Image (cartoon, grey):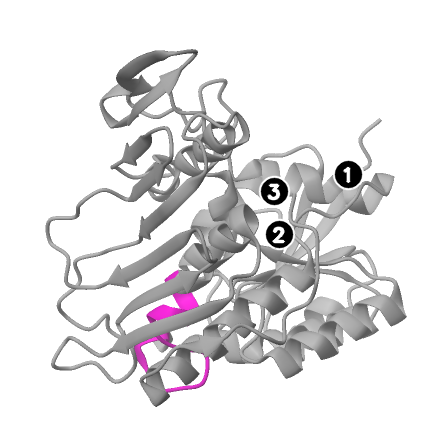
Amino acid sequence: MIHPLKVGLAGFGMAAKVMHAPFLGSMEEYKLESVLERHNNDSQERYPYVSVVRTIDDLINNPEIDLIVITTPNNTHFEYAKKAMLAGKHVVLEKPFTITTEDAQALIDISKKTNQVLSVYQNRRYVCDFLTIKRILAENLLGDVVEFESHYDRYRPEAKPNAWRERNEPGSGILHDLGSHLIDQALFLFGIPKTITADVRMQRPHAKINDYFDLRLDYGFTKIILESGMLVREPGPRYMIHGTKGSYIKSGEDPQEELLKAGAIPNTPDWGKEDEANWGLLHTEINGKVIKERYPSFNGNFGLYYKNLYETIRNGAPLKEKPEHGFNTIRMVELALESNQKKCTVECTGFIDSDYQ
């Protein structure tokens, strides 16, 4: 029997509107109870049954709420999550988990002390390409991976008006934002690297914070390249993976975000299904036969994150998106900034040993 979790949603910007509310508002495991909006009542246009509050304290002090989902700017994550857990609420934090590893460790300690579930919303683990790559690597279709290259590129030459992510503030910039996705995927698949060499830049003339990065992670045998920029009008492949037996090349974007922006409800049987034209190319050898063909993509589904979270909170299943994962991602960001500042390769130390699978 489903016993829905009542949810308080902190913030109603793009992340909340597109990545969270459509799932929290349509899944039987959840009931969207209240939304924090500083000045407007936008959430009630789509979810007329929710109550709108103006402060984080009003949200977390609601005794009906079980779970607080925090989608507010990065520099509020630590304070809001701490308050929520001390008030007896489970917490989901949008990525990046926190701005510093010091704050991340403090939240982990509070979670353990209060016995509240604390999770980071790494929804890019549930896109079609990453789910497909997991299967390809699990089945050893490429042999031992020698190089893994991942891109998250955009073309946005002008500054986005009033965007806190583009201000010169702690936790802003593309490395904390899109970098958190690429780093988490690399750590999930390959674990902690030996070293990192980073090139972090401001490429656009108006930029006030980093808008480009190139991270080189060295695992000894395996090399990983993570790159993201805002001046990529014509993107190349999103993933290029080369192994001792073959290669997998993948272009295109998971369809979910555009569907959600258009107002689609994520409850259809074919949700997250990718067009066959965007399936990746697998060129490898299987059972002595060389093949070069389009490899079917798995359906993406951000809702799997919330399915798993419900099982953890209600039924005690192991948490999949752990706070320690958030800590490790921020540790990698810190090391990338150190590498860039010193213009050198740095050792990867200071991580938390945590199972990703």
Vertically, is 15 above or below 215?
A: above
Q: Quadrant of the C terminus?
A: top right
Q: Residues within 10 Å of mark 2 (few under 14, many from 20)?
A: some
Q: Place residue 279 in its image quadrant.
A: top left
Q: Work out whether residue 264 can be spotted.
A: no
Vertically, is 250 above or below 172?
A: above
Q: Position of residue 103 (x, y in %)?
A: 65, 80
Q: Residues within 10 Å of mark 3 (few under 14, many from 20)?
A: some
Q: Position of residue 344 (x, y in %)?
A: 35, 82
> On the image, numbered disc 1 is attached to which residue?
311
> On the image, numbered disc 2 is attached to which residue?
50
Q: Work out whether residue 243 can be spotted.
A: yes
* 261 vs 342, nearest the viewer: 342
Q: Quadrant of the N terminus?
A: top right
Spatial distance from mark 3 to mark 1, Cα to Cα?
10 Å
Q: Residue at 53% across / 63% down in the picture? A: 71
Q: Which residues are magenta?
A: 165-178
**Mark on residue 305?**
3
Q: Earlier in the sequence, mark 1 or mark 2?
A: 2
Q: Position of residue 110 (x, y in %)?
A: 81, 74
Q: Amino acid at mark 1?
A: Glu
Q: Secondary structure at mark 3?
A: helix
